[in-house]
Image: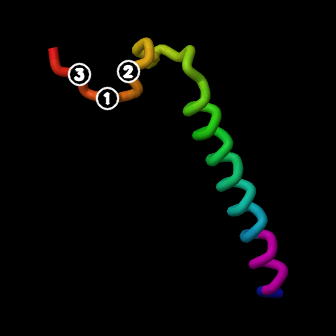
Amino acid sequence: MIRVTMAIYTFVRLDSQRSAFDRVGDALRDGDGPDDDGGAGGALVAV
C-alpha cells in the first residue's frame, strides 16, 4: 500500500517541479514583459 501511495506522490511532485521549471524558463526567455529594461541584463550602471 505504501508503494502505491509513494508512487502517486512522487509522480505528482515531479510533475509539479517540471511545470515550475518550465514556467521559470519561459519567464527568463521572455524579453517582452513589463520588467524589460531594454537590455541592461540586471547589471548596475554608474551614471
Q: Residue furthest left?
A: 47
- Residue drawn at the location 55% of the way across and 33% of the way down: 28
Q: What element carries label 1?
A: loop
Residue wearing tag 3: 45
Residue 6, position as x, y percentages in the image: 75, 78
In this picture, residue 26 sits left or right of residue 35? right
Residue wearing tag 2: 40
Q: Do the residues labelled 3 and 2 touch (CB within 8 Å)?
A: yes
In this picture, residue 30 sits left or right of residue 3? left
Neighbor class of circle 2 (other Cα within 10 Å; few <14, some 14-19, many 20+) is few
Residue 42, position as x, y percentages in the image: 36, 28
Task: Give the quarter of the image for residue 27.
Answer: top right
In this picture, residue 44 sits left or right of residue 8? left
Q: Quadrant of the N terminus?
A: bottom right
Find residue 34 and name its label. Answer: none
| Badge 3 amino acid | Val
Task: Give the quarter of the image for residue 22.
Answer: top right
Q: Quadrant of the C terminus?
A: top left
Q: How far apart are marks 2 and 1 (CA)?
A: 6 Å
Q: Nearer the viewer, residue 40 or 13?
A: 40
Q: Residue furthest front?
A: 46
- Residue drawn at the location 38% of the way across and 21% of the way down: 40
Task: Give the quarter of the image for residue 16.
Answer: bottom right
Q: How far apart are marks 3 and 2 (CA)?
A: 8 Å
> Which residues fall within the magenta stretch?
3-8
Q: Is 24 above or below relative to 35? A: below
Q: Do the residues labelled 2 and 1 touch (CB within 8 Å)?
A: yes
Neighbor class of circle 1 (other Cα within 10 Å; few <14, some 14-19, many 20+) is few
| Badge 2 amino acid | Ala
Residue 34, position as x, y percentages in the image: 47, 14
Q: Do the residues labelled 3 and 1 touch (CB within 8 Å)?
A: yes
Residue wearing tag 1: 43
